Amino acid sequence: MRLEQLKWLIGALGAILVPTAFTSATKTKIFAADLIGLWMHGAGSALTWVNSSGGYVGSQSVAYSESWDLRADMTYDSQFGGVSSITGHAQQQKTGTWSLSESKIIISPGDGSRAEGYWILSFENKPNGSVLTLLPDRFELDEGNFIYKQVWTRAKK
């Protein structure tokens, strides 16, 4: 299928198709309605240094969490919070619009900052909620870049 035909099909169906070569998801056709709700993800890391005798030298830690509240009217609110043992903490809140386009979620902040795209690698409905695996589109859609994926969760509606 040519790209122009795929774009027309996406517009006509109001859905995107997840490339099956990159996912083992239980759902390969995703509609905007599938994504409505509060999605969250986060990560953290800690490192402790010791000397050659095993004595404590120092440590460093970092953690963050992010949420998107995607609404049916294609608007969203997002929150980001991060903390580092070196630089302290940061918080950010944004509102804007979101859309589906060519196997991606596009997040467009209302403050005029650059829109961000995320490849949808997989979408799964689980007994306790849903799992959405995304890859920021600044990375090529290649298995070697999957170390940069983000796993988002949504509690059962």
Image: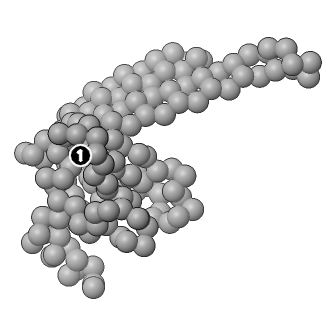
User: x, y percentage for residue 35?
Assistant: 21, 49
Classify 17 as above or below 125: below
Instruction: Name the residue located 15 percent from the left edge and 76 percent from the top edge.
Output: 8
74 or 54, nearer to the observer: 54
Q: Is residue 61 left or right of residue 27?
A: right
Between 28 and 128, the one nearer to me in the picture: 128
Q: Is residue 43 left or right of residue 103?
A: right
Q: In the displayed structure, would residue 92 be above or below residue 156?
A: above
The image position of residue 5, as x and y in percent, is 20, 81
Label 1: few (<14), some (14–19) or many (≥20) C-alpha neighbours in 10 Å = many
Which residue is label 1 attached to? 108
View extreme (right): residue:
53
> Which is more toward the observer, 115 or 125?
125
Residue 13 in view? yes
Residue 22 sits in which quadrant?
bottom left
Image quadrant where one finds the N terminus: bottom left
Tag 1's secondary structure?
A: strand
**Residue type at mark 1?**
Ser
Give me the residue at 79% from left, 15% from top.
Answer: 57
Q: Position of residue 150 (x, y in %)?
A: 43, 46
Q: Which residue is at 30% across, 48% downward?
A: 126
Please say whether residue 113 is visible from this viewpoint: no
Image quadrant where one finds the C terminus? top left
- Determine the residue located farthest toward the bottom in the rendered image: 1
Q: Position of residue 153 (x, y in %)?
A: 33, 41
Q: Who's the residue at 28% across and 45% down the image?
A: 127
